[in-house]
Amino acid sequence: MQDTRKNRVARLIQKELAQIFQSQTRMTHGVIVSVTRTKISPDLSICTSYLSIFPSEKGKEILENIGKNEKAIRYQLGTRLRYQLRIIPELRFFLDDSLDYIEHIDSLLSSQQPKEPESDKNE
């Protein structure tokens, strides 16, 4: 029962954070911030969110900016969830670099593939 509640709260927070970041990134053209995953502690006091930032070159800079504005983001989340949650969890943000890792693996695999032999043109 407790696990179901944790999952529902995590999904709700993920959805609301995504909407907050979507409204904030409309002002910064060319940057997309998406919430890929959220985890919440068993006592619902700490929420860990993983963010995917495009372009990835600006990832660290955007994550630092989000970290500085963490209290404002928590306040916005609180105004959106004031009727669903009694206590708004403390937010922690981390960079989700799984897409960069996938691209790196793909590039390694494509460079290691044997080249197809050219067929004889005389046949």
Image (tube, rainbow, N blue to C red):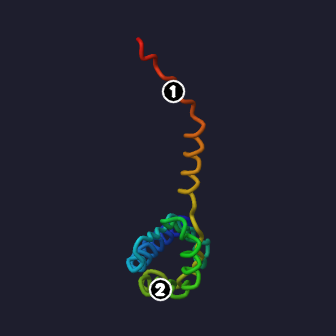
Q: CA distance from mark 2 to mark 1?
A: 58 Å
The residue under the point 47% across, 85% down is 78
Left or right of 83 in this view: 73: right
Looking at the image, the residue that sits furthest to the front is 122
* Number of numbered discs overlaid on the protein picture: 2
The residue under the point 61% across, 72% down is 41
- Quadrant in the picture for residue 93: bottom right
The residue under the point 60% across, 70% down is 94
The residue under the point 57% across, 34% down is 113
Q: Position of residue 42 (x, y in %)?
A: 61, 71
Which of the marked residues, 2 or 1, is nearer the chain's N terminus?
A: 2
Q: What's the residue type where badge 1 is placed?
A: Glu
- Quadrant in the picture for residue 50: bottom right
Q: Position of residue 55 (x, y in %)?
A: 49, 65
Q: What's the residue type where badge 2 is placed?
A: Gly
The residue at which mark 1 appears reads as: 116
Left or right of 11 in this view: 95: right
Q: Position of residue 86 (x, y in %)?
A: 50, 85
Q: Which mark is residue 78?
A: 2
Is disc 1 placed on a helix, strand or loop? Answer: loop
Mark 1: few, some, or many residues within 10 Å (few <14, many ≥20)?
few
Q: Position of residue 58 (x, y in %)?
A: 54, 70
Residue sitting nearer the eye, 121 or 69: 121
Q: Are marks 2 and 1 in contact (CB under 8 Å)?
A: no
Is disc 2 placed on a helix, strand or loop? Answer: helix
Residue sitting nearer the eye, 116 or 96: 116
Q: Quadrant of the C terminus?
A: top left
Q: Which mark is residue 106?
A: none
Mark 2: few, some, or many residues within 10 Å (few <14, many ≥20)?
some
Q: Nearer the viewer, mark 2 or mark 1?
A: 1
